[in-house]
Amino acid sequence: MKVKREETIKAAAVLGILLAVGLLLGGMQMKRAVVAWKQADRFVSVKGLAERDVKADLVLWPLSYSVSANSLDQLHGLMHEAESKIRAFLVRHGFDAKDITSNIPQISDLWTYAGENKPQERYRAEAVVLLRTSQVDQVKDVMTKTDELIKEGILLSHSWEHRPQFIFTGLNEIKPEMIAEATRSARDAATQFAQDSGSRVGKIRSAQQGYFSIEDVDKYTPDVKRVRVVTTIEFLLLD
């Protein structure tokens, strides 16, 4: 009986030691969890900006013109003559003929709703010759020479719908660098905030990339674009 009693006491002592160790380890894990939770709860949300001015690499230049006549046959002949002169003008100034296209003309009967005040010429046609080219600087130079077409009797018309469009197509090539730049900008802002609050910047908690925007630098230089992206990033703050 005495032996059994001693074994029982030893077993109880071992169990007590294991229980104490378990509580100690559990307490340490709990402390770590609380510290981790507190760290995760401390963060700063900042925005990072990246901007870059780039040169347009594609131009869509619509040359809109109109002709008038009293018969459809005469109207067709004038349209063909005007289009031929515009195409010749563009080729003469160094553009490739394969980059020049034309659209379907819009033909109007001006007598339909004229009543008694009918215009002298019954039919009017409006059409567009479109130049699509990567010769951006060449287009800008030739735009100042369209008076040559006026001297040849071509009636050019200008409208918002048929304005020249300067386009930048290389966004995918500069995206990675600009995202990295915006991220650095955000980290700089977070670092300044951390310094002011007596903390240190840790890892990124979450990040959201904004949309890329491409706009004219100003209305006088449509061939120069400003690419812009803003990122929103949350950084952990450490003591």
Image: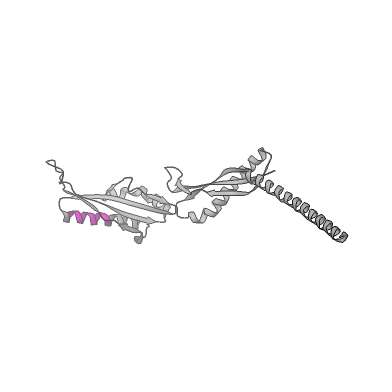
Which residue is at 68% across, 46% downward? 34
Q: Is residue 107 visible?
A: yes
Which residue is at 39% across, 56% downward? 133
Residue 175 placement, left or right of 119: right
Image position of 79 with respect to 44: above or below: below
Is 44 within the magenta? Answer: no
* Residues drawn in magenta: 73-83
Residue 28 placement, left or right of 78: right
Which residue is at 33% across, 58% downward? 100
Foreground residue, 100 or 33?
Answer: 33
Residue 218 x/y as whole percent? 44, 42
Residue 92 x/y as whole percent? 34, 57
Query: Which image quadrant: the C terminus?
Result: top right
Query: Which image quadrant: the N terminus?
Result: bottom right
Name which quarter of the figure residue 190 lies in.
Answer: top right
Foreground residue, 15 or 85?
Answer: 15
Residue 4 x/y as whole percent? 84, 60
Q: How is the image coloured?
A: one colour
